[in-house]
Image: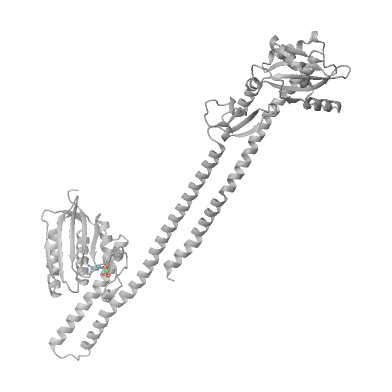
Amino acid sequence: MNATRKIALLLAVVFLLPALFFSGYELSSQNKNEAIIQEAYNRQLDAILFSVNQYSDDILNRWITQVEGGLSTAPSTSGTLDNLLMINGALSAVFMIDTVDHRAVPRVYALDSSMAEEVRRAWENPAWQNTSKINQLLSYKRSGFRKVDVLNGPPIDGGNFQWLVFIIENSRQAPRIAGTLIEPEVFVEELVGPRLQEIARDQFVLSVVRLQSGTTIYNTAPRDTAKTITEAFTKEFWLFPDYALGIRPKGSSIQQVINDRTTTNLVLLLSVDLLLILAVVLVFRNVKKEVQLAQNKSDFVANVSHEIRTPLALISMFAETLEMGRVKSEEKKQEYYTIIHKEAHRLSGIVNKILNFSQAEANKKPLTIEPLHPDTEINEILKTYDFHLSNKGFVYTFTGSPDLHILADRQAFIEVIINLIDNAIKYSPDQKRIEISCHRGIGVGLIAIKDFGIGISKADQKHVFDKFYRVTSGNLAQTRGTGLGLSLVKQLMDAQRGSIALESEPGKGSTFTLSFPLESN
Ligand code: ADP
């Protein structure tokens, strides 16, 4: 396995696997969390509804105590009961029947005389006095318990009424059936409602629903349109079996709150995962670059050693031959001198390239950006290179642009052009043709150097400007080089606020296009 693959695997194991594992675990435990939230929420709602029921019970018990007090006094002095009926709109009537003498007329109190009459008539019916519920209450009383119970009937016209019955004893300990007639909806409206409002504040919607018809008879947020009975958490209303208490969070249902939370969690989790993947990709790319650079560096050392060794060997061989005086003919001597000179020149070329590169990289070489006429400079370079080019069998053309004036550093400009021409020569073994041209682009001056050589593959095009990078496939490796040329060109172009672009097709040739700021800018 190569170094980059190892690093990729390591990153995946250290960062991605735990993240993906954690995400998977979170997703799978999402439902469990939901159930826990629902459970906790239901408990809270349950407690609230319990307290509402308790509160209603307390009110009723207070009433019953007052009713008991009122009934135990003589009929003529029962002002307490009249008062109680007057203050509490939900309390429609109070009655008491002598259970010993069933023929006795029930004692009834009501503000409305027709209501009093109706209640009296209803309870005169012995069937109502003998229901199993009343018999049960009587037996409780005999065992010493006091219990108030809900009774269905006798029916009363003109509204939804609810009977509450209990047993009291007269002074001779004789049991009597007593009770009240209550209008639940008025009870809710007048007494329970304010309490519900107090609890609800802006967090909950509390409601009272009539079970038979499913109609909401009280709602702390009447304008809130969400369906109360289907979405809310409901509990029976202890006092009134026909009614239920409902609760839900304001504005949205519990399910919606949970759904919102789940969505937020999922989005957060996915974002964190994405960020992590992005971070790992970035780290991997950087590491890969560094590994590549280290590889290129070691290739560079090998290349340069090779580059230097060949001319050194030639120089030392020919110098030694001359020194020993073995070469007699003046012509031969001259030839050897030329070789020594040429190889020394090549050596200094390599050393200069390395020095230039390290200076440019450290930004040590001060650049003087000034107006420059590319035509003049390129003609000058070509004049110097003419011999070299034709010696190597190259034909070249130059299409100038006489009006073009750019901003560049003269030395850097020459260095860049020479490097590109050198490469065009080096990498054009068959089609020995080079086309150089200048023209004006949009806001920039363009100089193109085109060859018809071996070209560069798409994959390598991305790297040829990297430090020390050399294309190693095919017989390219045999072409001498350091891998510094294009990197130096790129650095010099950046330093001159210019840029370089490459277009190339393997086997067809390459075009390097330099772009410089215009003088007029
Ligand atoms: P080198 O010293 O190897 O020439 P460079 O930095 O100048 O280093 O170039 C990097 C690589 O880009 C070279 O090894 C070569 O493979 C490729 N290259 C550069 N110029 C050309 C060109 N004109 N045609 C084909 N390949 C080129």
Outermost residue on the left side: it is: 402
Q: Quadrant of the N terminus?
A: bottom left
Residue at 13%, 75% (x, y): give it. 391
Give the total number of marks visible in the rendering.
0
Q: Residue 167 at what x, y percent from top left?
A: 81, 22
Q: Residue 411 at what x, y percent from top left?
A: 21, 61
Can you say whether 317 is above or below 363 in the image? below
Can you say whether 407 is above or below 510 in the image? above
Residue at 27%, 57% (x, y): give it. 494
Asked whether, in this view, residue 214 is left or right of residue 372, the answer is: right
Outermost residue on the top side: it is: 76
Q: Is residue 219 visible?
A: no
Residue closer to the observer: 181 or 105: 105
Can you say whether 144 is above or below 417 in the image? above
Q: Residue 456 at what x, y percent from top left?
A: 26, 67
Asked whether, in this view, residue 336 is left or right of residue 216, the answer is: left
Asked whether, in this view, residue 73 is left or right of residue 415, the answer is: right
Q: Quadrant of residue 470?
A: bottom left
Residue at 53%, 57% (x, y): give it. 21
Colour convention: one colour
Q: Quadrant of residue 284?
A: bottom left
Residue at 53%, 39% (x, y): give it. 256
Q: Is residue 256 visible?
A: yes
Q: Residue 233 at what x, y percent from top left?
A: 61, 35
Task: State ligand 1's quadrant.
Answer: bottom left
Residue closer to the observer: 103 or 341: 103
Outermost residue on the right side: it is: 172
Residue closer to the observer: 164 or 293: 164
Residue closer to the observer: 209 or 44: 209
